[in-house]
Image (tube, rainbow, N blue to C red):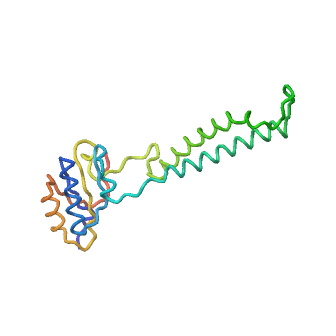
Amino acid sequence: MSSTKFILGCFEDPDQMMDGITKLQKNSIPIYDVYTPMPIHGIEAKLGVKESRLGYAAFCCGCIGATVIFSIVYYTLVHDWPMNIGGKPNFSIPNFVPFTFEWTILFTAFGMVATFFAATHLFPGRAPRVMDLRATDDRFVIAVDAKGNVPHDDITRLLEEAGAVEVKHNKRKYVSYDE
């Protein structure tokens, strides 16, 4: 049994990489992930990546922020320390709008950052994990899980036919920058 975990196809051109994705998908070979040094238009649809749910998290964080500050302001100005200012009522919603708006934006911003870091495992101080270090510079890499039923030679042949300049067999999942 082979100890290879991933087969990496390195491409110099994004169009060749997209062709490689098409060839692998036509042969029913599941792609683990694709690493590129820049955004490629249409790659999410081709790989079947689901739409992000970060917007739902932002909405929930904004609702929490609005509820928290509205409750604090209401308690403070209506129950704890009511003041008669110019004969206006204590519970006047237009006076609460600026505070509520600002705290909604604040909670949304911090909540989205925390949610993004949690979802992508990109916490500050964590060492980045990449399949091939050149994927952050000038190469486009397709990673194929080698534990499937397709022979490794067939995957290698398909990647080379698509225009891969190099096909590597990784025994580990990630490469560190220290190597």
| Count of all numbered marks drawn on residues in the image | 0
Picture quarter with the N terminus? bottom left
> Percent position (x, y) of residue 93?
75, 38
Q: Is residue 153 above or below residue 160?
A: below
Q: Is residue 89 above or below residue 53?
A: above
Quarter-of-image position of residue 110 = top right
Quarter-of-image position of residue 5 = bottom left
> Percent position (x, y) of residue 9?
20, 56
Quarter-of-image position of residue 83 = top right
Q: Residue at x 32, y 49 (%)?
A: 176
Q: Is residue 65 above or below residue 49?
A: above
Q: Is residue 84 left or right of residue 146?
A: right
Q: Is residue 98 above or below residue 9?
A: above
Q: Residue furthest top?
A: 86
> Percent position (x, y) of residue 146?
26, 66
Q: Residue at x 81, y 36 (%)?
A: 77
> Percent position (x, y) of residue 52?
44, 53
Q: Residue at x 51, y 49 (%)?
A: 55
Nearer to me, 1 or 12 = 12
Q: Is residue 42 left or right of residue 155?
A: right
Q: Residue at x 16, y 63 (%)?
A: 158
